[in-house]
Amino acid sequence: MKFLLLPNEPLIDLNLGGLILESTNRAELGGYFYDYFRNRDDRIVGVRCWLDDDALGEKSIFKSFCNDKRVSIHEEKHCVDVLFDSIHVSSLERNELKLDSAQDFGGMEVVQSGQTLGILFTL
């Protein structure tokens, strides 16, 4: 399943088609693997991206999401929490989401749609 996350926009299900995306080097993920956040129904509702030490530099894709409440940057832990829907933000804050140590090393890519940068997830 493919999904596109754009800053301050609802998650886009790419399995439905209709959107043209291009790979880009305008921004970088800077990470090496991610784990899944699961809700009480065991559905994946987000990911924790584990980053390289210098991954939050000028070209970090996560800088594009600095005003998006679904994305929480934890520089001291070298990780970024990304939720697919804002309804799960309060659940994460209350520690109600389970972090599933998947250590998935693929399935994320920085893409652009027009001039807008986003993150493509393949789960």
Image: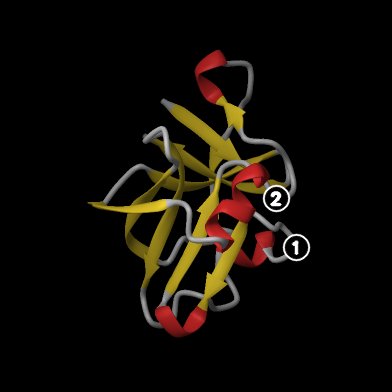
- Residue 107 is marked as none
47 or 88, which is in the foreground? Answer: 88
Up the image or down, 79 lies above or below 107; here it is: below
The Cα–Cα distance between marks 1 and 2, rounded to whole angstroms, is 8 Å
Residue projecting furthest to the bottom: 76
Residue 4 seen in this snapshot: yes
**Residue 93's quadrant in the figure?**
bottom right
User: x%, y% of residue 60?
Assistant: 55, 68
Amino acid type, callout 1: Asn
Left or right: where does residue 38 sit relative to residue 24?
A: left
Q: Which residue is mark 2?
A: 7
- Image position, residue 75 (x, y; %): 50, 81
From the viewer's perspective, is 98 left or right of 62?
A: left
Residue 26 in picture, x, y percent from top left = 59, 59
Q: Amino acid at mark 2?
A: Pro
Image quarter hosting the C terminus: top left
Q: Nearer the viewer, residue 4 or 92?
A: 92
Q: Quadrant of residue 19?
A: top right
Against 61, residue 113 (above or below) is above
- How many marks on residues? 2
Q: Residue at x 49, y 65 (%)?
A: 80
Q: Is residue 6 left or right of residue 53?
A: right
Looking at the image, is mark 1 or mark 2 earlier in the sequence? 2
Give the camera-side residue of 15 and 25. 15
Query: In the structure shown, which secondary structural element does the residue marked by tag 1 occupy?
Result: loop
Quarter occupied by the N terminus: top left
Contact (CB < 8 A) between labels 1 and 2? yes
Mark 2 closeness class: few <14, some 14–19, many ≥20 residues within 10 Å: many
Residue at 46% x, 85% y is: 76
Q: What residue is pinned by disc 1?
A: 67
